Image: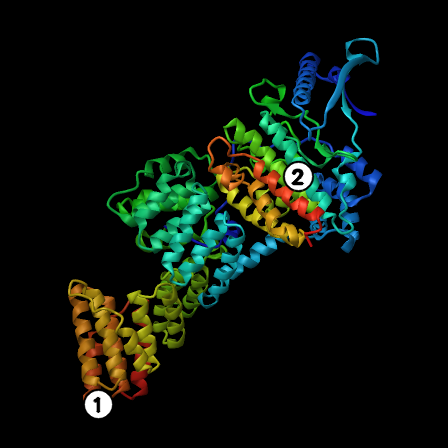
Amino acid sequence: MVPRWRSAFNTLEAGDLAPLAGDIPPIVDSALLQEKLNEWKATRTVPFASDLVGAGMMSGQLGEVREAAEWLVGLEEQAPLTVRRLASQALGRTRANAESRRITGELIAQQVTKVNPAVHKLRSVLQRYPRNPLAWVDLARSYASLGLLDQADRAIRAAITLAPNSRFALRSAARFFVHRRDPERARHILRASPATSHDPWLLAAEIAVSTVIGGGTSKFVPTGARLMKVGRFPASQTSELAGALGTVEILSGSRKDAKRLFECALIDPTENAVAQAEWANQKIGQVGIQERHFQLPRSFEARARRQYAEGNWQQALEEALGWLEDEPFSSNPAIFGSFVASIIGDAESGADLAVRGLDANPNNPILLNNLVVALANQSMIREAREFFSRIGRPGAEDPDDLAVWSATLGLIEFRDGHKEAGRALYQASRTMSRTAGNQLKHDMATLYLVREELRSPGADTPELVQNLMKELQTPTNPIVRTLLTSVAMEIRGKGLG
Amino acid sequence: MAFLKAMDFSRAAGTPDPATVLKAMLDSYVYERDLLSRCGERRLSRVVKAVGHGAAAVEPGVDGLVQYLIFELADGDVRTYMNLQADLDLAWSLRTLHEVAIGVRQLHWHGVAHLDLKPSNVFTFAEEGSKVGDLGSALEMGTISPNEAKEHPGDYRYAPPEILYRHQPPDWSRRRFGCDLYLLGSMITFLMTGVSAAAALQGYLDPRHRWGTWRGSWDDVLPFLQEAFGKVLDDFSAAVHPAARNELREMVAYLCEPDPTKRGHPKNLSMKGNELGTERFVSGLNLLASRAEAGALK
C-alpha cells in the first residue's frame, strides 16, 4: 500500500496533508488596531491604509479594516496593484493562491503528452525561487511521467534536502523510489526522518515499502500497532496505517487480524486505503467495503478493480483512464487498462493506453506486449513487429511470461499470413500455461487461437475449432466467459456452431 | 521640541495582581531607559536618541507617578513621506532603506536586536533622514530583560513565520537577529509595494496553512510557506522599479526567507561568526540609493 503521488494541490485537497492534532496552540494576538485606525482616518493616505489593512489581515480583524480596504480598492490605478490585491484579499474578493495552485495542479494532472508545459512552468518557478520543495516534488512527478527518471531523481532529492521531514516530500519520494524499483532507497529516506516514528501517514508508508522489499516485516510495525491502539488520532489520519498493517497480516496469514485492521481502515478511509481493501477483499473476502467507499474522490483504482472483478469491462476501462490521469507515471493503470481493452476488443484504446504507459515506462515488457497485441489486432504488422523486437524472449524459468510471449508472436504470425507458424506458437503457449498450472492463460490462448483460425479458415478449421472448444472447461473466470461469448458468436457467424 | 513616551502605571491597578504587573512595567521601563542610554553613549547615528528621562507625579500616590522618556522629535514616521499614489520616489525610498539598514547594523554590532521594526517605528527627520526608533521590545545580548521571557516582544503582525508558527531556532542570535533581518526585508517590501512581507505571505497561503489556523508541525507547513513566498517574490518583482528590481528582489529573497536557518546573505551564511551580517545589505542599498540620486536609475 505505497502512498499515492499526486501534485501538491491534489494531495492537499485529498486530505493527505491534514495536520495531526498539535499540542502547541497558535499564538493569540491581542494587539489592537485602534491606533492604526486613528492614523489612517487622520491622514487618508495609501501607506497608512495599506499598513492598517495588512495588520488587520495578520490579526484576523478584517471587519475593522473593511472601510480602509474598500477605499484602497476604490482608488483603482491610483494605488499600486500590490496594495489593491491585499485589500481585495482582506475583503475576500480574491483567492489568488487557491486559483494559481489549482491551475498548476491541473496542469500537472494532464495527460502525459501535455506534461511538458508543466515541466517548463515548474522549472521557471524554481529558477526564480529554488527553495520551493512543493515545486521540486511536482517537477519530479512531471519528469517521471515522461520517463525521465534521472531528472526526476535529482528533483526529488532536491525536495528532500529542502524538506527532510515534510510528510508530502517524504511520501512522494517513497512512491518515486518504489516506481524506480529502488524501495530500499525509499525506506532509507523514511527511516532517516524523525517524523516517521510519530506520523501515522509516514509509518504507513514505511511499513508498505518494507512489505514491497520483503524479507521480514518492518521494524515500525509495533510502533504503528501501538499508535492505532492508543487511538490518539481520528480514523481519517490512521486509515492508511491500518491498511498497511492489515496487508502485513494478510501476508503473514492472519486473516482475523487483517479483517479487523481493514475495518478500521474503512471507517474514514482514503481512496488509497479503499483500493488496498479491494485487493484484500480479493485475497480474504469480506473486509467490509461498502458502496460509499467507491464514491470517494479519485477512487479510480478501487472502482477499476471492482468493475474488473464483476466483469464490467467498459466501466473498468473508463476508470482505468481516470486512474492513469491520476498517476501518469505509473505503469499499473496503463497495464490494467490496455489489458481490459484487449478483452473487449477495443484495440484503439488498448494501443493508446499502452503508449501513454510507455511514455513514462519505456521498456516495460507488459506494456510493450499489450501494445503489440493492440497493433496486431489493427493489422499494423510492421509496427507490431517493431515493438515486439524490444521485448526480450523470456527464459524457460519464466513459463508464464514465455507463454504470453509465444501467444503474442503467434498473433503476429497469423495476421501476417503465416498460419502454420502462428498455430505452432499458440499451441506452445497453451502447453506452457498448462505445465505452469495457469488455467486462465491456457484458456485465453485457446480462445485466441480459435479466433485466429476462424479469421484464416482452411479445410481443417471446423475440426480444429471443435476440438479446441471441447478442451475449455466450464469457465468461471469472467475474462474467459467474455472471450468465450465473443468467440462463440464468431463461430456461429461462420456457420460452424 | 521633543517626543515624550510616558509609562502609565495606573494600568496595573485594575489587574488581578497589580504588584507583579507594576514590577514588570517598571522593569521594562528601566531596561529600555538603560538600553537607550548605552545606545546614546555608542553614538548610534541611525537610532532615535533618548535625550532625557524622569518621573512626574500627575496624581497623588504611587500609581499617579508617570515615568517618561524623552526622544528627539521626528517629523513623522516613514508612512508620512511615502508616496504610493504617484510615481514612487525611488531615490528617497532607497536612501531611507539604506538608513534603516544602517540602524539595524549599528544595533546588531552592539548585540542589540530591535524585534519591532515596522513602518511606524521608522522615523523621518527633515535634516538627518530616517532613523530606527522605539526600543521597547529590544533585547541586548548578555543582559537580562523582562522581554526575554516573551516568545516575541515585538508586534506579531509583522513577525517572521517561525515566530507565528512557534518554531523559533534555539540559538539566541539566529532567533533574535534573524527576526530583525526578516523585519528589514519587510521594510523593503513595504516601502516598495505598500505591503509588509508577513501580510503578503498570508495572502498567498491556503486558509488551512495560515498562522491562526495551522495546528500541525513546522516541517509540514514550511514547504507551503516557501511556495507562497515564491509568489510573493514574483509579485514584488513585478511591482518594483525595473532599475532596482533584480537587486531588491535578491535582498528580499535573502532577508525574508521563511526558513530561519537559511535566512541571510548566502555569502554570510557560509561565514562562521557572521552568518547574520547586514553589511552586504547596507552596501547594496547604498549603491542603489546613490545611483538613484545621481539619476542613473531610469
Q: Which residue carries the number 2 mark?
A: B98
Tell me if residue B68 comes above or below residue A178 in the rendering: above
Q: At which x and y percent is residue A349?
A: 41, 73
Left or right: A236, with A360 as reference point: right
User: Which of the numbered marks, if any, corresponds to residue A430?
Assistant: none
**Percent from the top left, x then y, of residue A293?**
46, 53
Between B184 and B159, which is closer to the camera in this rendering? B184
Closer to the camera in the image, B3 or A19: B3
Q: How many marks?
A: 2
Residue at position x 50%, y 28% from top? B171
Q: Is residue B213 visible?
A: no
The amino acid beneath tag 2 is His
In the drawing, what numbered circle is on residue A458? Answer: 1
Q: Residue at x 31, y 43 (%)?
A: A256
Would you say residue B147 is visible in this rendering? yes
Crowding at dot 1, Cα within 10 Å, few <14 / some 14-19 / many 20+, comes out as few
